[in-house]
Amino acid sequence: MKLNDLPQNFVDDLVAIRRDIHANPELAYEEVRTSKLVAEKLRSCGVDEVHTGIAKTGLVGVIRGKRSGGTIGLRADMDALPMQEKNSFLHASNRAKVMHACGHDGHTTMLLGAAQYLAATRNFAGTVHLIFQPAEEGGAGGDLMVKEGLFDRFDCDRIFAVHNRPDLPIGKWGTRAGPFMASADSFTIEITGKGGHAARPHLVCDPVVVAATVALAMQSIVSRNVSPLECAVVGISAIEGGNLPAFAVVPDTVKMTGTVRTYDTATQDLIEARMGELVAGICDAHRAKGTLQFTRLYPPVINTAAEVEFARLAAAEVWGEENANANYTPSMGGEDFSFMLQKRPGCYSVIGQGTGGEIIPIHNTRYDFCDAIIPNGVRYFSRLAERGLPL
Ligand SMILES: [Zn+2]
Ligand SMILES: [Zn+2]
């Protein structure tokens, strides 16, 4: 098999696999069918070892090269999202309220393609570890794999992963050294006052007014406390309090939830501290009670400089020098490959899948992974292994 001239039936098979996974999406830690499909494909293409049941549904395939040498880890995610697909094509989700709206079906397929190529050719010295992780969408499957000894069992000198980007044209690849994606934290604020008749405000402690004051004050953290040279998001995404038809009932409590995004721990610490001070101070001033629950979900994705340059060279071979951008704009999105990058040097990058028409973003009910980018995804993963473990 030649990488720059992949057989049509090989590509067709991969497209069929991608559509099969898309039609049968599974939520975090429930990727039983997908995990079984991946294990079967890995075994049938002659991968040396397949280890299942890591972080529940995660698995690792091992391919040894023609000679011994170093190690490399290539990672794909397998989970779908709890949302209803609105596409009507043949491979649309056949499960209610579960959908591959982030293209993890495509990531899994591209890594399966690379597995097939690498197992058939083995033009490398050393060991390739193919990491298929569960639960990227909020379930921290990457973290659980690391905690269950991923790198103790399958050592990786360096690690690589990709994500599709509908807003980046097909044929373009991007990454950058240092922070590439943000930490993703969640918080819940509960404000308790004293409910009662809205016409007698002097007899109640109105948590709605306190919540509104807290929500506005939160906006001062990024604008007034965080350095203007740092990147940060503090966003309240939902407020819940009272019952809508009850126009004259002041509720006892109001709850709010939202997210915080940063690139470094110092800014993260500062924001959490300021949120706590604002909630406590404002509630105190209004004679209400406030609690803040702050949960650090995913750390930021920090790419190491040497691996970014190494990945850029592989990407330049696949997409062309002018299309491999190692100075790509970072984002405040989260990604749990960050847990693996805390343990091993590596590079997370994005592959364009924009066709020039309407951009349907990831996590949209009409999103679909673009099959046309599968061959280059296979080439990229494969060249990372061959370049990283030269004969
Ligand atoms: Zn996603
Ligand atoms: Zn994703």
Image: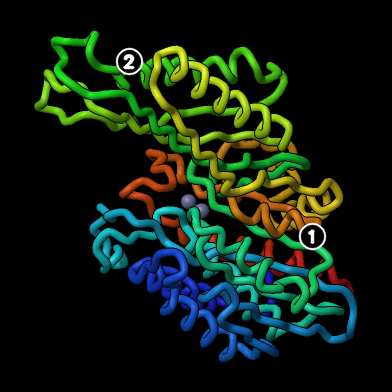
Residue type at numbered disc 2:
Val
Report which quarter residue 59 is drawn in. bottom right
Q: Is residue 22 left or right of residue 344?
A: left
Left or right, 345 with reference to 30? right
Q: Looking at the picture, how far across and down is residue 65, in whole percent? A: 81, 83
Display coloring: rainbow
Q: How many residues crowd mark 1 within 10 Å: few (<14), some (14–19), many (20+)?
A: some
Farthest residue to the left: give it. Answer: 245
| Residue under the image location 71 percent in, 69 percent down | 382
**Can residue 388 be seen from the camera position used here?**
yes
From the Cβ of disc 1, is ligand 2 less than 8 Å away? no
Position of the C terminus, as image quadrant, is bottom right
Where residue 316 appears, as percent x and y from the top left, is 75, 51
Q: From the image, tell me which residue sits under label 2.
A: 209
Q: Which mark's residue is nearer the viewer, 1 or 2?
A: 2
Q: Which mark is residue 344?
A: 1
Residue that sits furthest to the front in the current view: 203
Residue at the (68%, 66%) spot, across then down? 146
Q: Nearer the viewer, residue 297 or 206?
A: 206
Q: Quadrant of the N terminus?
A: bottom right
Tag 1 and tag 2, C-beta contact below 8 Å: no
x%, y% of residue 198?
A: 16, 15
The residue nearer to you, when weighing 301 against 371, is 301
Q: Which mark is residue 269?
A: none
